[in-house]
Image (spheres, rainbow, N blue to C red):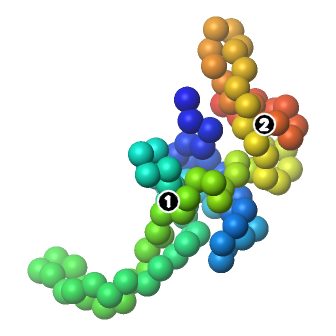
């Protein structure tokens, strides 16, 4: 089970977007990276194709998982993630407040 999953609210701990929050759009476990909406935005030159216009576009680039922390469901501050077994199911728990993340 992964600590950070698609759809989670995360806080950036390091880099140019330090302190900002966003939603995880995609997780790449093999590369240990995640794409977060509005975080690590880069501008790319795109060539015009038959169905897409050319120009400079902004896209969300992947950011390393070590620079992300889950936002606590209670107060939105960064928290570590723990695991507990409840009713025979493994669930994620915020270490900061003890609140269950998977509801």
Residue closer to the observer: 66 or 82: 66
Above or below residue 56? Residue 94 is above
Residue 18 x/y as whole percent: 72, 70
Please indicate, yes or no, whether residue 103 appears anywhere in the rendered image: no
- Give the vertical position of 57 relative to 69 (above or below): below
Q: Residue 62: give x, y in percent of width and height.
A: 48, 63
Lower sequence index among marks 1 and 2: 1
Task: From the viewer's perspective, tell me whether residue 18 is left or right of residue 37.
Answer: right
Is 63 left, or right, of 67 in this rendering? Answer: left
Assign a secondary structure to mark 1.
Answer: strand
- Residue at the extreme top: 88
Which numbered tag is attached to residue 44?
none
**Quadrant location of residue 94?**
top right
Residue at coordinates 56% horizontally, 36% vertically from top-left? 2
The disc at residue 35 is 1
Residue nearest the observer in this picture, 93 or 54: 93
**Could you tell me which residue is drawn at 64 percent across and 8 percent down?**
88
Residue at left 55%, top 29%? 1
Q: Residues within 10 Å of mark 1 (few under 14, many from 20)?
A: many
Measured in 3D between alpha carbons, the distance from the residue under mark 1 to the one under mark 2, in whole angstroms, is 21 Å
Visible residue check, residue 70 = yes
Which class describes the residues within 10 Å of circle 2: few (<14), some (14-19), or many (20+)? many
The quadrant of the picture occupied by the C terminus is top right
Q: x%, y% of residue 54?
A: 25, 88
Q: Is residue 1 above or below residue 46?
A: above
Instruction: Report which residue position mark 2 lands on.
Output: 94
Q: Secondary structure at mark 2?
A: strand
Above or below residue 32? Residue 41 is: below
Q: Residue furthest left?
A: 50
**Residue 44, position in %: x, y?**
37, 83
Q: Residue at x 73, y 31 (%)?
A: 82
């Amino acid at each position: 089970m992964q600590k950070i999953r698609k759809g989670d609210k995360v806080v950036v701990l390091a880099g140019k977007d330090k302190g900002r929050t966003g939603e995880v759009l995609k997780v790449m476990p093999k590369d240990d990276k995640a794409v977060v909406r509005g975080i690590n935005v880069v501008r790319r030159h795109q060539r015009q194709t038959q169905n897409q216009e050319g120009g400079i576009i902004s896209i969300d680039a992947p950011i390393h998982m070590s620079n992300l922390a889950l936002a606590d469901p209670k107060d939105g501050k960064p928290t570590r993630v723990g695991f507990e077994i409840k009713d025979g199911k493994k669930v994620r728990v915020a270490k900061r407040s003890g609140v269950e993340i998977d509801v």
